[in-house]
Amino acid sequence: MTEIQLEKITKKYGAIETIHGIDLTVTDGEFVVLVGPSGCGKSTTLRMIAGLEPITGGDLRIGGEIVNEHEPKERNIAMVFQNYAIYPHMSVRQNIGFGLYTAKMSKADKNKRIEETAEMLGLVELLDRKPSALSGGQRQRVAIGRAMVRNPVAFLFDEPLSNLDAQLRSQMRIEIKRLHQRLKSTIVYVTHDQVEAMTMADRIVVMRDGHILQSGSPTDLYENPSDIFTARFIGNPSMNMITAIATQNGLVAENGNAVLSVASPDVAINSKVSVGVRSHALSVGVPNGAAGLTLTGEILVLEPLGSETLVHIDTADGVVIASAPALHQLTAGQTVSAFASVENLYFFDSDSQKALMRP
Ligand code: ADP
Ligand code: MG
């Protein structure tokens, strides 16, 4: 059982607190991704779990035992970094075996473990090569192998794919995910890239400024963001956001020409409401008279993606990104309308930034 439990964990550097009492339980075998912008405290949190950074306050439990004061090696957790630092003068076999450097095992047992690990990572044919004769993806797999070979109770990954090109990154995402499906090991994975979080995680934990904002499955976060930050951070393009005022007769665009035929959510009259809509739910064309949001403006730019075209529209309520079918006849400079029906709209309190019940 390798449950990792953070209870009111804080971190101070001198007088400055950077992690503000976070609670998080990673269950046995779960793949949890911590995601958030640079500087929000992802690496610090991971390093505290690994034992590379002292914990200022709170309790860290691994498998039920408080390990705040345990040395990294007593925790038996493996960490894979962005700069995977494999040794250029060593072969793949020696690099993977380096993970067993301090292990009290016979040479034969060590070799057996190295070969089993190489087998799992598709590195068997490459065991005698030097890193210079490997591709970027193969080198990253060697680094993972060095972590795996020790049979750790959990894996921690800190932005391990950031140095790879886009194609390799998406390939390695799949490889790590498949590895997890086979090993069923507990994983805490840190990234600033919401695509990595969405595609790999069992559960995503959104961090901001040393706090956890929300945690849930990728679909849950995408469909039910609890605040504006998560709504705009998860999903690409970012959720469009229009500011409206709650009136007796429904929402009215704060300034601009957005047409809202929607009742006001349960907030005080005259308070500001941010109305969100994802691009794929905002389609270019004539509104069909249904309740919802209509925006009108000039096309700034078109982004054909093959399966659809993203249409950037300069409206009086700000630039929004709508979606049009791939072969739609549209040109920059043209004036168009985009429409989203009410069930595709999100509502947030503009002051607290928190999600409101849909009216
Ligand atoms: P992330 O990994 O999410 O980009 P970090 O965990 O590296 O963020 O950093 C979180 C915050 O802690 C940042 O504001 C950073 O400046 C601060 N920080 C990190 N390491 C140190 C340190 N050794 N001394 C002082 N402040 C630090
Ligand atoms: Mg970091």
Image (cartoon, helix red, strand yellow):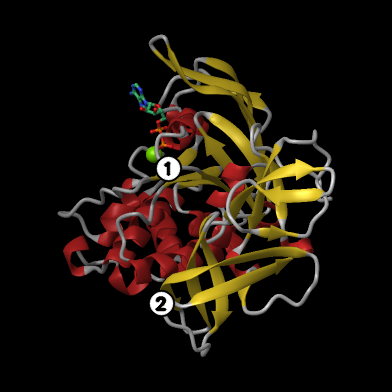
- Find ligand 1 in the image and state its quadrant: top left
User: Between marks 1 and 2, how big is the CA–CA gap?
Assistant: 49 Å
Q: Nearer the viewer, residue 98 or 344?
A: 344
State the image coordinates of residue 278 (x, y, percent, origin top left): 62, 62
Which is in the foreground here, disc 1 or disc 2? 2
Based on the displayed image, in which of its 4 quarters is residue 103 positioned?
A: top left
User: Could you tell which of marks 1 and 2 lies nearer the N-terminus?
Assistant: 1
What quarter of the picture does the N terminus occupy? top right
- Identify residue for label 1: 79
Q: Nearer the viewer, residue 244 or 25?
A: 244
Question: Does residue 158 sit above or below 14 in this rendering?
Answer: below
Respond yes or no on whether mark 1 lies under 8 Å from ligand 2: no
Q: What SS does tag 2 mark?
A: loop
Label 2 neighbour load within 10 Å: few <14, some 14-19, many 20+: few
State the image coordinates of residue 80 (x, y, percent, origin top left): 40, 47
- Identify residue for label 2: 332
Residue positioned 21% across, 51% down in the render:
87
State the image coordinates of residue 242 (x, y, percent, origin top left): 61, 51
Q: Nearer the viewer, residue 308 or 218?
A: 308
Residue 18 located left or right of residue 6: left
State the image coordinates of residue 97 (x, y, percent, origin top left): 33, 51
Residue 162 located left or right of residue 249: left
